[in-house]
Image (cartoon, grey):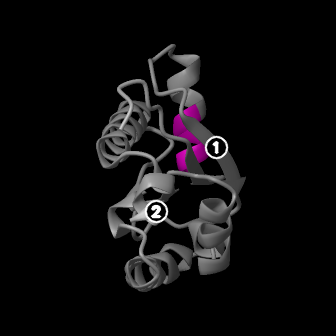
Amino acid sequence: MSESFEPKIVAFLCNWCSYAGADNAGTARMESPANILPIRVMCSGRVSPEMVMRAFRAGADGVLVLGCHIGDCHYVNGNHRTIKRMPLVRNLLGYIGINPDRLRLDWVSSAEAPKFVQVTTEFVDAVRALGPIAEEMAQ
C-alpha cells in the first residue's frame, strides 16, 4: 500500500441534521477531511442498500451514512429504518468480499459541528488504514 493513499469517501448526509452540521462546521472554519464527497439526502432512511453499493461500484473506498439522532428525525422514524437497514448492508458487504468496516453509520445533529469533524476524521483515518478498496478486492 502506498503511503500517499487518500481514500475516497461518499457521505450520505441527512438534510435536516447532518448536512446542517457539516455546513456549520464549514461556517465555523473547522478543519474536516477533504476526502468526503457529501451527498445530501432528505433523510438517512432514504439511503438504500443499492445507493451504498452504487457508491462502492463507483470507486468509493468507504461510505458514511449520517443522520439525525434517534427520536429527532424530521420524518419521525426514518432513522429507525436506517438503524435496521445498515447492519444488513454490512453483512452483504462482507458476503461479497468488502470489509464491512468500510461502511459507517452515525448520528450528527445540526448543532454538532465538532462531532461532524470528529466522525469524518475518524472514518477517513480508519479507511486509510484499510487501504484502497481495489487492493482488498484483488485478494
Of 11 and 94, nearer the camera is 94
The residue that mark 2 highlights is 138
User: Label 1, label 2: how many angstroms apart (C-alpha)?
Assistant: 27 Å
Of 126 and 57, nearer the camera is 57
The residue that mark 1 highlights is 38
User: Which range of residues does the magenta coloring cover?
Assistant: 17-22
Q: Identify whether 130 is placed above or below 51.
A: above
Residue 107, x across and y down, in percent: 40, 56
Q: Identify whether 42 is placed above or below 4.
A: below
Q: Is residue 137 visible?
A: yes
Inspect the image, locate mark 1, and give the three-letter code of the amino acid beneath it: Pro
Inspect the image, locate mark 2, and give the three-letter code of the amino acid beneath it: Ala
Tell me which corner region of the image, top left, top right, bottom left or bottom right, holds residue 103: bottom left
Would you call the spot at circle 1 few (<14 residues within 10 Å), some (14-19), or many (20 or more)? some
Q: Residue at x 53, y 33 (%)?
A: 35
Q: Identify whether 93 is placed above or below 120.
A: below
Q: Residue furthest front?
A: 139
Q: Residue at x 48, y 83 (%)?
A: 85
Residue 41, x across and y down, in percent: 69, 59
Q: Earlier in the sequence, mark 1 or mark 2?
A: 1
* Main SS category, magenta section: helix
Q: Identify whether 100 is placed above or below 50.
A: above
Local secondary structure at mark 2: helix
User: Which quadrant holds the C terminus?
Assistant: bottom left
Q: Is residue 62 visible?
A: no
Q: Residue at x 48, y 39 (%)?
A: 7
Residue 34, x across and y down, in percent: 54, 26
| Residue 114 is a magenta residue | no
Please name which of the two marks, 1 or 2, marks the residue nearer to the observer.
2
Residue 20, x across and y down, in percent: 59, 40
Total numbered circles: 2
